Image (spheres, rainbow, N blue to C red):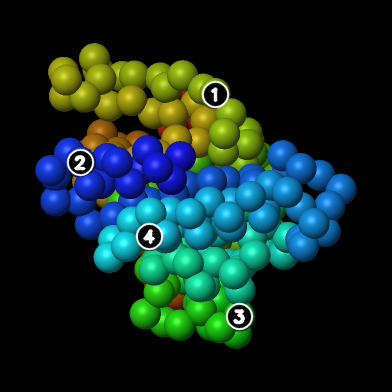
Amino acid sequence: VAKEAATVLHDTGAPWAGTVLDFEAVPRKCPNHTLASNPCVQGFTALTRELRAAMPGRLLTSAMPYTPLGGYFDYAALNETLDIFALMAYDMNSDDAVGDVSGPGSRLNLILKGIESYLKLGVPPSKLMVTLGWYGDDFVCNASGWNSSGWPRHDRCVLAYPPSGPCAPTCIDGGPKAGGLCISNCTEDIGYGEAKDLHDWLEASGARVSDWIVGDDGVSPFFQYISPTDGRRHQVWV
């Protein structure tokens, strides 16, 4: 792998700055091992050493969890080989530590704690790059936790389906190409512009929709609405 990557970088003539790795769930491939003895974890570290030797002068970047997870990577060793730790600070609403609830895909308080944890491991600030998703989420909420007025008692609601569940959207007025829109029957990504358009369309159509609200993190905006197609409650966070 290291030789192939170095060949692409050196022989194609393209002005590549370096290479980016994205190996996820590494230790799960080799269960029942400590960090020091886990062949998958140590194999990834060895790969970065080989790449570092094969591509001098090039940047070596790897995608990393937004907070260092114990047993996933040998962070001290990677600090010697990687130029950039690209922290994946998105899709955090489905994180095991948070649960399947609505909320911002990038949670500022958790991101800051993650950065602090990397710094404590000796990774310098110059090597930390926070990556964010340029989209939000349209969540379908279940019925629990909603008060008599129909809006949730707290900012976030428990999801009717896991964020990864497959669902087909319901389209009205011919969908976006015909001036209508499509509403998810489950959680799905939604672009910032799409979220604004959805809110404007719901207001103009007389549907039940809230104003934009600042979430409990003090930063992230969201709104909630009742789907005009089936009466299900949604929250849109961006």
Seen from the viewer's position, the closer of residues 205 and 37 is 37
| Circle 3 Cα neighbour tier, 10 Å, few/some/many (<14 / 14–19 / ≥20) | few
Where's residue 103, x and y in %? 52, 56
Quadrant of the drawing holding the C terminus = bottom left
Label disc, if present, on residue 166 of the rendered structure: 1
- Which quadrant of the view contains residue 162? top right
Q: In the image, is residue 155 above or below residue 219?
A: above
Query: Quick check: can you spot residue 238?
Result: no
| Circle 1 Cα neighbour tier, 10 Å, few/some/many (<14 / 14–19 / ≥20) | few
Element under label 3?
loop
- Report the residue marked by disc 4: 60
Where's residue 163, x and y in %? 57, 38
Element under label 2?
helix
| Circle 4 Cα neighbour tier, 10 Å, few/some/many (<14 / 14–19 / ≥20) | many
Seen from the viewer's position, the closer of residues 192 and 52 is 52
Element under label 1?
loop
- Report the residue marked by disc 3: 121
Label whose residue precedes the other's in the sequence (3 or 1): 3
Label disc, if present, on residue 90 of the rendered structure: none
- Report the residue marked by disc 2: 11
Label whose residue precedes the other's in the sequence (2 or 4): 2
Q: Residue at x 67, y 55 (%)?
A: 42
Q: Residue furthest top?
A: 174
Element under label 4?
strand
- Mark 1 → mark 2, Cα distance in angstroms: 42 Å
Q: Residue at x 54, y 23 (%)?
A: 166
- Which quadrant of the view contains residue 83? bottom left
| Circle 2 Cα neighbour tier, 10 Å, few/some/many (<14 / 14–19 / ≥20) | few
Contact, CB < 8 Å: mark 4 with mark 1?
no
